[in-house]
Image (cartoon, rainbow, N blue to C red):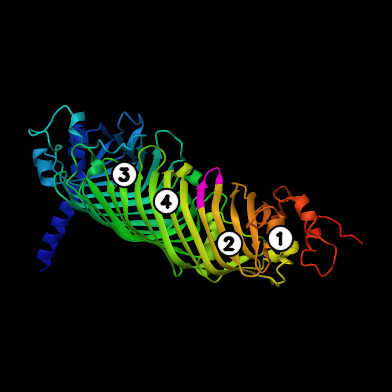
């Protein structure tokens, strides 16, 4: 028994001595050109590795530096650089036959730069492209294959930017990629994760491959994608100049055959802001969507886009084109009978400012908008309709006291809106409302048109047809069956209402305004700023 233990001890000691001594007898640096050539041929890019050392215990060759060149059309700086590269090898062929058989590649702390040009082409698209290599396969259809059981990128950093430099580059850190049974010519499993700007996280679990031999970005992919606390303002998905901010969670899938990528899932946002001068929404917004994206043409279709804000539901469909620096869209948004109470907290995110201290409550809102153009110059046209709602804490009657007095009705602190309809045009130069028809039971019907500037300045020409007032008044105004012209100015937070004196025929009206207290038209003297006779 003791003899057996001694033998085992001697064998173990001998193995340890061999493990320590062999690296001194095997000149692994002689394999550096082979490693660089093998990786460079497969990637279609020059590859440089640093000083090599052999670790018998881990069965690997380690390099103290790695550099993979970028596509020269994009940059002269490295596409990937790392402080160390671990190359797993089969030890017996290496020691006895000086043959390098790679079993794994582990890149520690890599730094990668992803760049996109004006045509929508990425700098990684040419990886493995045989047109960049002097030697090609016999059928010229697939890259020189490299097959490893394990390919890992650990604790990396990825910078996403564009050649124009218009946008500030976005940096993702703590990037980890685990690939098993990697091959250019077959599909392989992939698990990837990253920390997003603003402390969010990304996880991808699926498969990719075979690698497309002419454009790596067209490689087929099947994956489950999870995003948590994505900061929209610091993501590569949104141009910061659009003013879109908020936090988003996404859970969905991505399936690409190399031509069409289909993405679907649920996106939930909080504190969403959609315009530069807006403010964060007080309610979450959920989007359930299905998108089909043409990878080659950088364009796609929104097949499903269900937008939910509380119980309010709208449907978004259309197309988009991502070529160039700014995405262009052609979409339709349709929402029918949406509860106003659920939409109220969303108004600030759209830059809609109500009179100070007021808010909408009750009733329903319907909307249909067609949006066309680049996102930074988007023009939206359509219509809105609101029914049985109220503008709480805003007494329109007091703003039009001289006019409302003619109806003989008390308006109260809230303005009840029986019906409101209008055509809408929203553009960078401002918002225009046409064919406005507003029915307020305590006042009557108000019609007209006007604009809201980007600074929320109002310029409206309206006509008030008062409830319960006979035709003599409108005839006296020279307007036939019309009403009293009113100019609305000021701002959305502090609107002003003034009778339009130029729209009235003063001479005709003077003869119809006696000074008697009981005359129903006597109040018009104050309306026009004229003193009543003593």
User: Which element type, helix, strand or loop, lies under badge 3?
Assistant: strand
**Magenta residues, dominant SS class:** strand
Q: Which residue is mark 4?
A: 370
Q: Which residue is mark 2?
A: 438
Hey, which quadrant is residue 477 in on the image? bottom right
Q: Earlier in the sequence, mark 4 or mark 3?
A: 3
- Between 44 and 517, the residue placed more toward the observer is 517
Disc marking residue 299: 3
The span shown in magenta is 424-430
Q: Earlier in the sequence, mark 1 or mark 4?
A: 4
Q: Is residue 391 above or below residue 192?
A: below
Q: Earlier in the sequence, mark 4 or mark 2?
A: 4
- Between 456 and 80, the residue placed more toward the observer is 456
Q: Are marks 1 and 3 in contact (CB under 8 Å)?
A: no
Mark 4–mark 2 distance (CA, rounded to whole Å): 23 Å
Mark 2–mark 1 distance (CA, rounded to whole Å): 20 Å
């Amino acid at each position: 028994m003791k003899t057996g233990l001694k033998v085992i001890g001697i064998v173990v000691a001998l193995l340890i001595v061999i493990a320590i001594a062999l690296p001194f007898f095997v000149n692994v640096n002689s394999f550096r050109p082979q490693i660089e050539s093998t990786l460079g041929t497969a990637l279609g890019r020059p590859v440089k590795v640093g000083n090599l050392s052999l670790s018998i215990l881990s069965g690997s060759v380690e390099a103290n530096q790695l550099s993979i060149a970028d596509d020269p059309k994009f940059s002269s700086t490295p596409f990937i650089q790392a402080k160390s590269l671990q190359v797993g090898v089969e030890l017996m062929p290496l020691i006895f036959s000086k043959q390098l058989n790679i079993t794994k590649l582990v890149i520690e702390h890599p730094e990668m730069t992803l760049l996109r040009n004006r045509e929508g082409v990425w700098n990684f698209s040419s990886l493995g492209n045989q047109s960049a290599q002097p030697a090609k396969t016999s059928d010229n259809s697939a890259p020189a294959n490299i097959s490893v059981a394990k390919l890992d990128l650990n604790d990396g950093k990825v910078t996403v930017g564009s050649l124009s430099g218009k946008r500030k580059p976005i940096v993702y850190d703590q990037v980890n990629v685990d690939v098993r049974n990697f091959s250019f010519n077959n599909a392989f499993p992939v698990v990837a994760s990253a920390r997003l700007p603003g402390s969010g996280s990304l996880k991808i679990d699926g498969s990719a491959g075979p690698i497309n031999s002419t454009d790596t970005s067209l490689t087929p992919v099947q994956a489950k994608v999870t995003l948590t606390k994505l900061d929209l303002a610091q993501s590569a998905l949104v141009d910061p100049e659009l003013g879109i901010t908020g936090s988003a969670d996404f859970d969905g899938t991505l399936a690409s055959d190399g031509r069409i990528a289909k993405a679907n899932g649920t996106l939930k946002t909080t504190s969403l802001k959609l315009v530069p001068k807006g403010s964060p929404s007080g309610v979450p917004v959920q989007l359930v969507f299905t998108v089909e994206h043409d990878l080659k043409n950088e364009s796609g279709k929104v097949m499903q886009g269900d937008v939910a804000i509380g119980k309010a539901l709208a449907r978004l469909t259309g197309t988009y084109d991502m070529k160039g620096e700014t995405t262009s869209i052609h979409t339709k948004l349709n929402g029918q009978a949406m509860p106003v109470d659920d939409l109220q907290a969303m108004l600030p995110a759209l830059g809609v400012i109500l009179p100070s201290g007021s808010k909408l409550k009750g009733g329903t809102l319907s909307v249909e908008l067609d949006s066309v153009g680049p996102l930074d110059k988007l023009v939206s046209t359509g219509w809105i309709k609101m029914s049985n709602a109220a503008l709480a804490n805003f007494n329109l009657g007091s703003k039009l006291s001289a006019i409302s007095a003619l109806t003989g009705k008390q308006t109260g602190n809230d303005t009840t809106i029986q019906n409101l309809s209008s055509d809408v045009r929203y553009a960078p130069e401002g918002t225009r409302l046409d064919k406005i028809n507003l029915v307020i039971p305590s006042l009557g019907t108000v019609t007209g048109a006007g604009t809201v500037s980007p600074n929320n300045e109002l310029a409206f020409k309206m006509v008030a047809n008062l409830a319960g007032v006979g035709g003599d008044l409108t005839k006296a105004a020279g307007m036939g069956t019309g009403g009293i012209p009113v100019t609305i100015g000021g701002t959305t937070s502090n609107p002003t209402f003034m009778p339009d004196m130029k729209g009235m025929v003063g001479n005709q009206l003077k003869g119809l305004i006696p000074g008697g207290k009981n005359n129903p038209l006597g109040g018009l003297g104050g309306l026009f700023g004229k003193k009543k006779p003593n």
